[in-house]
């Protein structure tokens, strides 16, 4: 069986350790009936990559990577959505080898066509954050084009928040979006992405939010909810909704007196559990490609590292772990030419 270049890890080590991520050769995965074999051109790095590396100790080499853009090389026996030569983007799933390899097998039902007006690198910045933002807004919070009220986006300079602001600007015209940012420069950035109001989460969040929405906000997106429940109780209106993407608090019972609903979001759920609506992620990514091509959603790439190798991935993981990154970190191209 043929092999190709990949980056993976054997043990949970700090990103500063040269052994935390290593260059390797792996065998090409045998395709399942609905699989595409994708020639990976670019990948991006998300907090889930660093969390998995630090928390999941593999049996052998494990290849991470939960965002990619590339070209379909081959297809499984039951594939109907794509053909060899198609350019695609996708986020993958946590229970299969990831995108940090030259060729990756991925189920067609969680893959979309690559937007034609952006590079592979910019396309790779979008899938995980866009799917998460979309599912938070429309599947978890239940927003529609007819919704009106206030949406608070906490952590708006992160990858998910930066896409959520753009989706809300285009698809939720009567929703007022309040975004949090840590300084004036980042505040200006989130305004450009579509925020109607900006508050500083290093200050008194409740006081600042209630100044904009005196009756409390209708919906909250939280990327950093640990220890924040008392504040969320105060700034969310009775009957409001909160969706979280982090591990969150252990106890949300203080939300009960105001009948505030708490929702969890993991964009891997559909693929991990092979849900009947798994193909919805294909449709979401195709819709996203339309929005990108129309100039209504912009990639949130803030840095591109070349080539894709262990050294650059360790650098990217270290930057993510610093907690100071905005937007998305992308890696493009391989040291070893693709066969």
Image: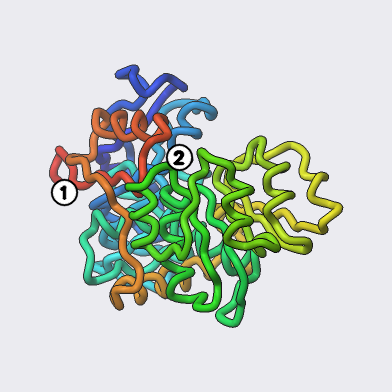
- Pinpoint residue 28: horizontal percent, then vertical percent: 33, 45
Q: x%, y% of residue 333?
A: 18, 46
Query: Residue 289 vs residue 95: left or right?
Result: left
- The part of the image, by quadrant, that contains residue 124 is bottom left
User: Residue shown at 21%/61% (left/top)?
Assistant: 119
Q: Earlier in the sequence, mark 2 or mark 1?
A: 2
The picture places residue 235, in percent across and down from the top left corner, at: 68, 53
Which quadrant is home to the N terminus? top left
Residue neighbourhood size for the residue with mark 2, other residues' Cα within 10 Å, grouped as few (<14), some (14–19), many (≥20): some
Name the mark on residue 74: none
Name the residue carrying label 2: 47
Disc 2 or disc 1, which is closer to the eye? 2
Q: Secondary structure at mark 1?
A: loop
Q: Is residue 295 above or below residue 222?
A: below
| Residue pictured at 39% horizontal, 43% vertical | 183
Residue sitting farthest toward the right: 257
Real-space Cα separation, disc 2 to disc 1, in angstroms: 31 Å
Q: Is residue 85 above or below residue 48?
A: below
Residue at the image point whose x is 33% and y is 39% from the top: 27
- Can you see residue 33? no
Please give the residue where the numbered disc 1 appears in the rendered image: 339
SS class, disc 2:
helix
């Amino acid at each position: 069986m043929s092999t190709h270049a990949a980056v993976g890890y054997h043990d949970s080590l700090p990103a500063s350790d040269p052994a935390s991520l290593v260059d390797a050769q792996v065998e090409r995965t045998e395709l399942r009936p609905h699989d595409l074999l994708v020639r990976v051109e670019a990948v991006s790095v998300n907090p889930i990559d660093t969390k998995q590396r630090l928390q999941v100790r593999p049996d052998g080499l494990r290849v991470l990577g939960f965002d990619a853009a590339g070209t379909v090389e081959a297809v499984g026996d039951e594939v109907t959505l794509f053909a060899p030569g198609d350019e695609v983007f996708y986020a993958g799933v946590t229970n299969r080898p990831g995108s940090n390899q030259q060729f990756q097998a991925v189920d067609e039902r969680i893959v979309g066509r690559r937007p034609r007006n952006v590079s592979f690198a910019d396309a790779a910045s979008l899938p995980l954050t866009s799917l998460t933002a979309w599912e938070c807004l429309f599947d978890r919070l239940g927003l529609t084009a007819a919704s009106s009220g206030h949406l608070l986006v906490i952590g708006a300079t992160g990858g998910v928040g930066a896409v959520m602001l753009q989706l809300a600007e285009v698809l939720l015209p009567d929703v007022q979006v309040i975004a949090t940012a840590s300084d004036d420069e980042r505040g200006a950035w989130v305004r450009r992405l579509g925020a109607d109001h900006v508050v500083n989460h290093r200050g008194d969040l409740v006081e600042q939010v209630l100044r904009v929405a005196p009756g409390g906000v209708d919906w909250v997106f939280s990327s950093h909810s640990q220890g924040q429940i008392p504040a969320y109780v105060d700034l969310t209106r009775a009957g409001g909704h909160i969706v979280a993407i982090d591990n969150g608090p252990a106890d949300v019972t203080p939300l009960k007196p105001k009948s505030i609903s708490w929702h969890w979001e993991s964009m891997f759920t559909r693929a991990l559990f092979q849900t009947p609506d798994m193909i919805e992620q294909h449709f979401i990514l195709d819709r996203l490609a339309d929005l990108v091509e129309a100039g209504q959603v912009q990639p949130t790439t803030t840095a591109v590292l070349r080539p894709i190798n262990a050294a650059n991935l360790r650098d990217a993981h270290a930057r993510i772990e610093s907690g100071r990154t905005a937007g998305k970190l992308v890696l493009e191209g391989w040291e070893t030419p693709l066969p």
